[in-house]
Image (cartoon, rainbow, N blue to C red):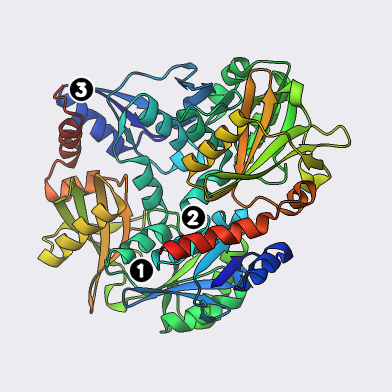
Amino acid sequence: MKIVLFSESEKESNKEIIEAGKKRGHTVTFVRPSDCSFFVKKNTFEVFHKNRTFPQCDAILPRNSFIEKLNAHFLLLILENVMYVKCFNTIESILIARDKIKTLQILVSNNIPILKTGLSFSENNIKHIIEQIGENQQMIKLPIGSMGVGTILTNTPHETHSIFEILQQLEKNPFIQECSTESLGKSIRCVVINNKVVASVKFEANNGDFRYNNADGNNISSYIPTKQERAIAIKSAQAIGLDFTAVDMVRSQSGPKVLELNSSSAIIRTMEATGIDIADLMIQHIEKKVGKKS
Amino acid sequence: MKIILLDEEPQSRLIEAAQARGHVIETIDPSACSIIVKDGCFEVFYNNAPFPQCDAVLPRKSTLCLKGTCYLLPQLEAQNVLCVNSSQSMKIANNKLHTLLLLALHDIPIPQTGFSCAQTGIKKIISMVGGDKQITKTLWGTWGIGTILTDAPHGTYSMVETLQTTETNCLIQEYIKEFSGKSIRYIVIDSKIIASAEYESIDGNFKSNFSIGGSVCKAEQKKVEEDISIKAAQILGLAIAGVDLVRSKDGPKVLEVNTCPGIEGMELATGINIGTAMIKHIERIIGEK
């Protein structure tokens, strides 16, 4: 099978997936979205990579968030509809997962537990949503961002208000969430592939940071999720429509709450902590869906 | 029936049309809304009070699907509020590239169009589009803003490259010389043609938008254009649409589809009450419920 890994970055996780694909006898090509273009004349479509015809392939693995910024999801739309190439995950699900607010909206509609959340579109409503969320400590988050960037912990309503206002003026679409103090700096992650939880870890910030996923260090260890946590993780993946995902949750007094779903999460540390070959499982899933062994 | 217009300013034509048919109509500024989730339930607020009960919401601002307010319509829909047009259809129609791709996938004629995700492919796309002059267009934009006429290849190249460095990408399109400064708009409501008009710039501009001073007059309706317009609205899922097309030497080609077509100029030119047609459409859907 011919697989294209579609990403701007050659980070370790991507290398791992490429290796896993090769090990199972597939050809895996690395394609940068920024090298791509397309042309439409009447109802014929041509897609290019480095100004040559886009490589023939059976499956595409889009693996980063630049895709929307570069408008490369339109290229995938053409490949899916005209060349019948399957994307894992689908573009639609990637675009939802990339936006935390959209994700939360869909989760709530599917009765999946999330933290109290408030969203305002102008400065006149900020005070009201802060009051509605209640409590002194609150989280301000941005809909787009990974590795904990775009998450702010505030200690008083005034602090929340002033930070929220600035982010709103910058048109960053901030939102407020309750801060479950008992789980600050901690979270659990369930890796879901094809509606099964295949690996789970827990994160703990090691330097007093309130973010469990800060880039400069956290402790990660294998974790056995409860039946409820598994069920929530699977239901979340289904609601967003992701083939592979890492579902992040906090354990609050009133049960687990979903924070976000990652459509192309880093997998190396989870693989190391659990001993489970996630990359291989991803490739196996693609084989099953595309119906080609090699 | 109670209808809510989501717009920054009240639109008198629509308000008159709704009131004349005995409905209550209220204008709500989308940016004065907020959303709270608590105990697994969503609640939408307007000016910090619960969002008013209503039978239908008429989003009348195309930018509703951009910026922060893009989260508002899907939320109202999740709470079973009828939105005409739907958030999904508005989102697609607001992106010119997404619109054109979907139309082309369904065999609707569009101008030759190319797109390069970044710098690598620009040159090749320019040569494929061809011609001495080309149109470069940002993916968002109304009232003709974001549409630029450039000389190929160097003018187009420098324009696209410059815009890309400001994180604004654009599509490159063939320039339809024979219909420059003109466009035809068909208003489609519920898969029926309600009105059509021809727009023409009056000062030699290559853009014909009424809002920037274009003139408007009743257009001769052509069956092939009507069929294309109805199909385009259906493909995008728009109950209310303004389909803009040009008459090229190879036949009509769709330029873009408007989700909140301005009605005033059109009503003046055609004498057709488009606002009433919109309200009647909502009555029909509510009646079917």
Q: Residues within 10 Å of mark 1 (few under 14, many from 20)?
A: many
Label 3, on which residue? A26
Q: Is residue B129 left or right of residue B90?
A: right
Q: What's the residue type where badge 2 is placed? A: Ser
> Alpha-carbon distance for marks 1 and 2?
36 Å
Along the polypeptide, which appears first: circle 1 or circle 3?
3
Q: Is residue A175 left or right of residue A197?
A: right
Residue visible at 57% across and 17% down in the picture: B124
Using the rendered image, report if marks 3 and 2 lie on a common chain: no
What's the chain of the residue with tag 3?
A: A
* Residue B277, label in figure: none
The quadrant of the picture occupied by the N terminus of chain A is: top left
Cβ–Cβ under 8 Å for marks 1 and 2: no
Q: Nearer the viewer, residue A268 or A106?
A: A106
Q: Is residue A196 left or right of residue B264?
A: left
Q: In the image, is residue A238 above or below residue A42?
A: below
Q: Position of residue A196 (x, y in %)?
A: 14, 50
Residue visible at 51% across and 33% down in the picture: B103
Find numbered disc 2 in the image and state the secondary structure of the residue it sits on: helix
Find numbered disc 3 in the image and state the secondary structure of the residue it sits on: loop
Q: What's the residue type where badge 1 is placed? A: Phe
Q: What's the residue type where badge 3 is placed? A: His
> Alpha-carbon distance for marks 1 and 3?
42 Å
Closer mark to the observer between disc 3 and disc 2: 2
Label 1, on which residue? A210
> Alpha-carbon distance for marks 3 and 2?
41 Å
What's the chain of the residue with tag 2?
A: B
Using the rendered image, report if marks 1 and 2 lie on a common chain: no
Q: Position of residue B171 (x, y in %)?
A: 60, 31
* Residue B87, label in figure: 2
Q: Nearer the viewer, residue B240 or B129?
A: B240
Q: In the image, is residue A196 above or below residue B53?
A: above
